[in-house]
Amino acid sequence: SQQGEEDPQALSIQEGENATMNCSYKTSINNLQWYRQNSGRGLVHLILIRSNEREKHSGRLRVTLDTSKKSSSLLITASRAADTASYFCAIRGGSEKLVFGKGTKLTVNP
Amino acid sequence: GAGVSQSPSNKVTEKGKDVELRCDPISGHTALYWYRQSLGQGLEFLIYFQGNSAPDKSGLPSDRFSAERTGGSVSTLTIQRTQQEDSAVYLCASSLVRAEQFFGPGTRLTVL
């Protein structure tokens, strides 16, 4: 299966701490994307990293990709209560569809 | 411009009834996707439309599910003879080719 598997399933940290979420997958990919979901409704795209890239940054977000290990990580630095959400990785292989993992539920305590 | 919109936002129906869910993608986006998300789960791909190409229906769970996209814009997902296991949030997304997907707020379907 192409499905990404996020780890951990749930993460609780204090405001100001860093949060790291991991995603592993099993097949070759074209790109890997991270999304955030608040309150179980619409998803917001965070970062897209292509298979030939190793690291990307966007504000307080840092994504790494290791294609040899078939894994990616999302780091949120200096977390805020507003970062509380579920985070999903999504795999794009040879087709146009994205295959999502089950997500990591992040709670940032004030 | 406006984002992806979906209607209705909530739908409660009785088992055995048919339902139609609507998605208005972002203007100019040629790709449109439907996903389903059950409580506490990840997104399950249902169907994908790209321009005038034949849709990728590989994710539809049964022949009770169908979708169409008229004029390359608005899409309707139809579920016939609904079952309780169809209860979920149905999410629509649109994108340019091979680009990030923009999601609508979803339709929460409850089958009693």
Image: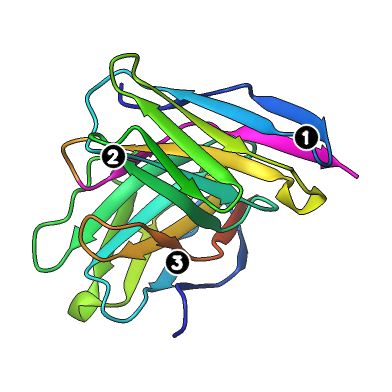
User: Which label lies toward us, 1 or 2?
Assistant: 1
Residue A5 position within the rendered picture, expressed as x and y whole percent measured from the top left: 47, 23
Same chain under badges 2 and 3? The reply is no
Q: Name the residue type under label 1.
A: Glu
Tell how many labels.
3
Name the quarter where the C terminus of chain A is drawn. top right
Q: Residue at x 76, y 54 (%)?
A: A82
Q: Nearer the viewer, residue B81 or B24?
A: B24
Residue A95 position within the rendered picture, expressed as x and y whole percent measured from the top left: 18, 42
Secondary element at tag 1: loop
Q: CA distance from mark 1 to mark 2?
A: 28 Å
Q: Residue at x 29, y 22 (%)?
A: A67
Magenta segment boundaries in residue numbering: A96-110
Q: Name the residue type under label 2.
A: Asn
Asked whether residue B85 is in view, the answer is: no
**Disc nearer the start of the sequence (1/2):** 1
Asked whether residue B92 is in view, the answer is: yes
Name the quarter where the N terminus of chain A is drawn. top left
Q: Is residue B38 above or below residue A47?
A: above
Residue bearing mark 1: A17
Tag of residue A31: 2
